[in-house]
Image (spheres, grey):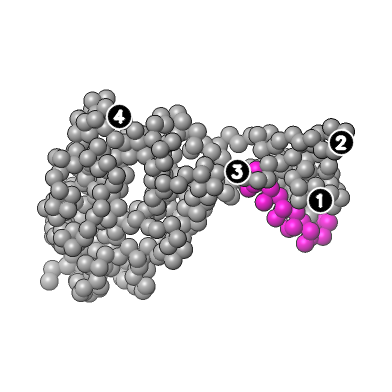
Amino acid sequence: MEARTRAYLRGRFGDHYRRAEVTPPPEANEREWGYVPWTEGPGDTYVRHNSLLDLGDLGEFLTRERPRHVYFSAGRYDDPSATTMSGKGWRRSDLVFDLDADHLPSADPDDSYAEMLAKCKDALYRLLDFLETDFGFEELTVVFSGSRGYHVHVRDEQVQQLGSDARREVVDYVRGIGLDPEGLVRTEVRGQGGATARVLQTGGGWGRRVHRRLLAFVEELAAMGEEEALARLQELEGIGEGRASTVYGAVQANPEAIREGNLEAGGPGIRTLVESLVGETVEAENAPIDEPVSTDTNRLIRLPGSLHGGSGLAVRRLDRDALDAFDPLTDAVPETFRSHDIAVEVTEGGTVELDGDSFTLPERIHTVPESLGVFLMCRGRAEKARE
């Protein structure tokens, strides 16, 4: 990034912060704060181990320093400005989740920025289902990261004292890591004779997800002819030609057992089908979070209300019921950058979608809306042109 571009962006970030009201997180004075200034060179310079006392009034700090990125810690400490983690005196930490479009299994290098963000929102809904339905967490803050994804901060009291190992268990659960099909089954006593049956736990958790996929899969088979259905069954792990016939017969003969999740009534056929669908369910319905973020009790995370220096978009705190309507490429564009046009020299051409419009820009000087120019400069695709 050229010096002229860097100076322009720093100045305009400062203009934004003079207008913005940035709300600090709870217990802000107990957290470590860090930021990245607009320094020259290929890498970023991180300034960390600050307390809020070191920075001063948050709004004044942002206006004065005009940082490229701003972070605060998930952890709370006795002395957040200590220069070693052991010296800080850890008290407790939020449980933080990070979803990044670049890390999604469904990510495609040919996806547009908007398509990446749409896939990431789908993953966000899956994560929230785990956190709200399976774990019953209530103190959730959802944040658009300002770039490629979303953050979720869990501040329920029961997570605050969890160490890294316990947080790892939460991560493994939402990722479906090591999910044992046997753990999804319970034994029920049925009838007056005391007979028992092994039943899929359909009321919640991964059992609910596997059962939902089982019902959808059986419905899919019902719409096929027998030959096509047998071929579809053989696509599942652990089901060959002979076993496919057994499973198909069990599915045809025991629709009620499948609806109930009864693994006994259908014999080995239904049990085999359920076991085979577990892996497919995990692959499709896990939440592909950035695991080290959630297990780290000392993690720094972006400050809602700040600007992301890699996009020029705002890090936005989102109401839970507003997620459906939220369009990051429109709703996270700062009003400060909507006032006029600027000249930029595009160094990496292509099509860009932003603020409800689409722009195709070859590599030359263009006059564009400032929001687009800032976006391109922050992403390293343009330099500020001389006026």
Q: Measure the alpha-carbon separation of dots 3 and 2.
A: 30 Å
**Magenta stretch in the rendered image:** 207-228
Residue 216 left/right relative to 382:
right
Residue shown at 20% from the left, 55% from the top: 1
Give whichever of discs 1 and 4 has the lower sequence position: 4
Q: In the rendered image, which residue does mark 1 sit on?
A: 256
Mark nearer the viewer, 3 or 2: 2
Q: Measure the alpha-carbon separation of dots 1 and 3.
A: 22 Å
Identify which residue, 335 or 92, lies in the foreground. Answer: 92
Q: Where residue 195 sits: x, y (%)?
A: 84, 33
- Residue 96 visible somewhere in the drawing: no
Amino acid on which disc 4 is placed: Trp
Q: Measure the alpha-carbon separation of dots 1 and 4.
A: 54 Å
Q: Where residue 127 sits: x, y (%)?
A: 49, 48
Is disc 1 in contact with disc 4, using a CB cutoff of under 8 Å? no
Q: Which mark is residue 192?
A: 2
- Residue 33 visible somewhere in the drawing: yes
Q: In the rendered image, which residue does mark 3 sit on?
A: 205
Q: In the rendered image, which residue does mark 4 sit on?
A: 90
> Regarding mark 2 in the picture, which secondary structure is present there?
loop
> Regarding mark 4 in the picture, which secondary structure is present there?
strand
Q: Measure the alpha-carbon separation of dots 2 and 1.
A: 20 Å
Amino acid on which disc 3 is placed: Gly
Q: Where 46 falls versus 385 (above or below)?
A: above
Mark nearer the viewer, 2 or 1: 2
